[in-house]
Amino acid sequence: MGESSRRVTSVGIPMDAYRKEDQFLLQFDVPGVDSESIELTVDNNTLTVKAERQAPVLAEGIEALVAERPHGVFTRQILLGDNLDTSKIDAQFSDGVLTLAIPVAEEARPRRIDIRHDSSKTEILA
């Protein structure tokens, strides 16, 4: 196995998405990744999540027999659309799970429209 077990693998980040009231929740699995190596960017309503997990450093005399855990750079891009307020994304990282809460934009939220009662008749078409 030797040298080939240390190569960098590029893999997408698994994700779950939920809606909770007036916000969307996204959860990304990034086990073994330090929170400092996670980069979040939003450009043109596209969210990019980028993380890096370093390959293990093997001490002299240690040979990997099985190396199934991927390492290297992991990325995921999601088109968020216009109805979310990307300026108010809240990001939390705990136990290898990155959770983003993205509120629905105020103008995209359902709202009630009041109907006023007017007893006088109005001509719409003349």
Image (cartoon, rainbow, N blue to C red):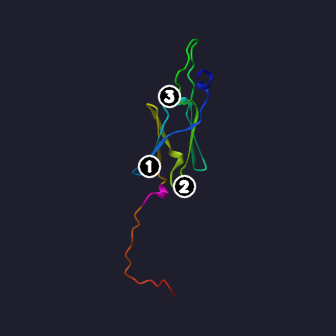
Q: Residues within 10 Å of mark 3 (few under 14, many from 20)?
A: some
Q: How far apart are marks 1 and 3 (CA)?
A: 28 Å
Give the mark nearer the N terminus: 2 vs 3. Answer: 3
Measured Cα–Cα span from mark 2 to mark 1: 13 Å
Name the residue: 46% across, 32% down. 96
Quote the CA–CA distance across marks 2 and 3.
33 Å
Q: What element carries label 3?
A: loop
User: Circle 1 sits in a helix, a strand or a loop, which is it?
Assistant: strand
Given residues 88 and 76, the one toward you in this image is 76
* In-image side of 70 versus 24 (left or right): right
Q: Which amino acid does label 2 sit on?
A: Asp
Q: Do the residues labelled 2 and 1 touch (CB within 8 Å)?
A: no
Q: Which residue is drawn at 37% across and 81% down?
A: 119
* Residue span colored magenta: 106-110
Question: Is 108 covered by the magenta stretch?
Answer: yes
> Is 13 or 46 nearer to us in this picture?
13
Image coords of residue 37 (percent x, y): 56, 30
Residue 121: % across, % down: 41, 84
Seen at 50% across and 43% down, the residue is: 89
The tag on residue 23 is 1
Which residue occupies the extreme bottom position in the image?
126
* Circle 3 residue: 32
Picture quarter containing residue 112? Answer: bottom left
According to the image, label 2 marks what residue?
82
Count of marks, rendered view = 3
